[in-house]
Amino acid sequence: MLGKLLDGRYQVNQVLGAGGFGRTYLAQDTRRPGSPICVVKHLQPANRDPNFLETARRLFNSEAETLEVLGNHDQIPRLLAYFEEDQEFYLVQEYIEGHPLSKELIPGQPWDQTRVVDLLQELLELLDFVHNHGVIHRDIKPDNLIRRNLDKKLVLLDFGAVKQIRTQLASPQGQMSNTVAVGTPGYMSSEQALGQPRPTSDIYALGIIAIQAITGRMPAELQEDLNTGELIWQHLAPVSPGLKHILTRMVRYHFKDRYQSATEALQAVRSLITASSGQSVPPSQPTPHPQPLSQQGTLAVSPAAPPRRPTPPTPPTPPPPPEAEPESEPNRAPLIIGVGLAVAMAAAGMAYGIRQGMSGGMARGTCTVTAQGLNVRSNPNAAIVGTVNKGTKLTLTGTKQGDWVEIRSPKAGWVFGKYVDCSTVDTIAEQPASPTPVETQPSPTPVETKPSPSPEPTPTPEKSPVQPKDNGAEVLTEAAEEYQQGNLDKAIAAAQSVLPSSPAFEDAQKKIETWQKEWSEAKTKFDKIQQAYNEGRYVDVIIYAADSDFPEQRYWREKLNDLVRKATQRKNQGDTNQETPPSSEQSNPQNPKPETKEPTGDNSVPICEPETEEAC
């Protein structure tokens, strides 16, 4: 992939990260002045079934639309492009130059209260914007907040819904259990750990970050009340009663006891600031809630552009009043008056036509779809009623609302205007009558030309010997599929068979190293989660499984999803029947261990099946 030109413009230069779903690259936009750096996220579906691809395409496009709208905020990276190539999906976003907030949260070095309050105000304003667009971030943590070098503002990255997309794309069936939470232990609320995130889950995570800052303690060091589940942190730092109340409410165990919106929490912080300064503050105006673009939320990356502010929509220009008919004048110089009147009427008509075109926002006519599988919605930001493929001609109604354009065919509805090309729009307008034709003179009789002399035949050069076809890329693709299926040894053997003369040789060596490292990491983490399951700690299984750093490798992900499903079932049974969980103490050493199917490779791990009441 390194050196490849994606979509004819994005030159891939560096690998930033890799997983079972695909990779993240640093690239240069070769079509912009100076070739600025951008981030390309490559999402690879594990299933090539047409029905699955169509579902994945609609999901991908919906989330790309969400990222497009959220990117209008100055502190969220812009989506520069999204496209499909060879049945794989790509997101292109701004590159943010800066450092993560985690670099500023040094253990044992607590922040002062003023700095914490400023942090809360800045991030609650950002969360208010996100939530009011119907999106839950799902993974608020210090590593996803970048302090931008340009202006020292915090930029919010890595929206959690795209993690759900890539998890689905990495699943051969295109399905994902709702109990597999997206988030990071320590910053994740109890309801989010059970796969039921809410806007208050983001407020909880931000409260944890603020407590981490004010106490200088990592989230894992905070104790909780065993009876209520509430965090006990107030004794760790000198905090004013007002700030203590705000933080305590933000991290309450039950979501109903927290602030119910970022707007409400932001008003409390502003009131605290006002009380400290002795000034009065007007109540915050509630932000209107548009219909959600996404029920899943969204991934961000990282800017090359100066800070942006959302531009307020331009109100439509009212249609001009009808032109008053000129009063008749005495019949003086009728020819001059007639010509002047005609010119004036023509100018008025042109002005009216221009104003009408501006008020409609776009001429009626046809445009071409530039994105594969563009969603058609019943109204802007409303339900999807269909899709149109790349290259499809759209008939416009002439109505535009913000970034949305209304179309008449091939399906009536609204599409996102950024992904249609209207540069060669054929406007539909009444054509003026053709002027009286002028008789033309017949063309002169053509002069007969002499045929050119036939060229002398060129001697055919001798054919060079046929070079053997290089199939390194195909072999590497098959090896990658073996790896995703859990056949590590076969995958490595196939990758090692790529010849040094092949252009894919270097990539093959890197993949071998990546696979071995990723496999070892996934095995270690899965063993820990399996142990928690064997000991009956089912809630811990669900929380551990939500680790956002768990490798996105299909074989281990499927094992993990299956284990979480079993843990959830047993937890629910335990809540109702008080069933004793299986543990290693219940194992019968006299009985042999059950045989389990193993993937090929020395690094395979036996799967413990608690239903057999055997210990591994």
Image (spheres, rainbow, N blue to C red):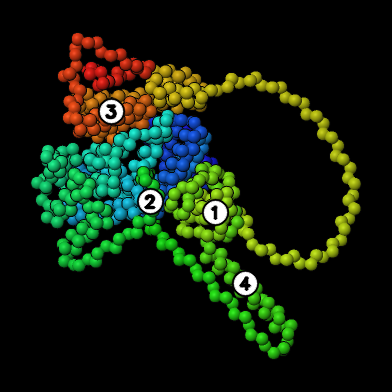
Q: Nearer the viewer, mark 2 or mark 3?
A: 3
| The disc label shown at residue 205, or none | none
Answer few, some or many: residues within 10 Å of disc 4's Cα (few below 14, many 20 plus, some between 14 and 19): few
Name the amino acid type tagged 1. Answer: Ile
Answer few, some or many: residues within 10 Å of disc 2's Cα (few below 14, many 20 plus, some between 14 and 19): some
Name the amino acid type tagged 3. Answer: Lys
Lower sequence index among marks 1 and 3: 1
Lower sequence index among marks 2 and 3: 2
Relative vertical location of residue 454 with respect to residue 464 in this rendering, above or below: below
| The disc label shown at residue 349, or none | 4
Determine which residue is flagged by label 1: 407
Looking at the rendered structure, the secondary structure element under dot 4 is helix
**What is the CA distance from the residue labelled 1 to the residue labelled 3?**
48 Å
Lower sequence index among marks 1 and 2: 2
- Nearer the observer, 367 or 221: 367
Relative vertical location of residue 555 with respect to residue 548 in this rendering, above or below: above
Determine which residue is flagged by label 3: 566
**What is the CA distance from the residue labelled 4 to the residue labelled 3?**
73 Å
Answer few, some or many: residues within 10 Å of disc 3's Cα (few below 14, many 20 plus, some between 14 and 19): some
Q: Is residue 255 visible?
A: yes
Determine which residue is flagged by label 2: 292
Residue 399: x, y in percent?
52, 60
Residue 426: x, y in percent?
63, 56
Q: Residue at x 55, y 43 (%)?
A: 389
Q: Nearer the viewer, mark 1 or mark 3?
A: 3
**What is the CA distance from the residue labelled 1 to the residue labelled 2?**
22 Å
**What is the CA distance from the residue labelled 4 to the residue labelled 2?**
42 Å
Q: Residue at x 27, y 41 (%)?
A: 192
**What is the CA distance from the residue labelled 1 to the residue labelled 4?**
26 Å
Relative vertical location of residue 60 with respect to residue 148 in this rendering, above or below: above
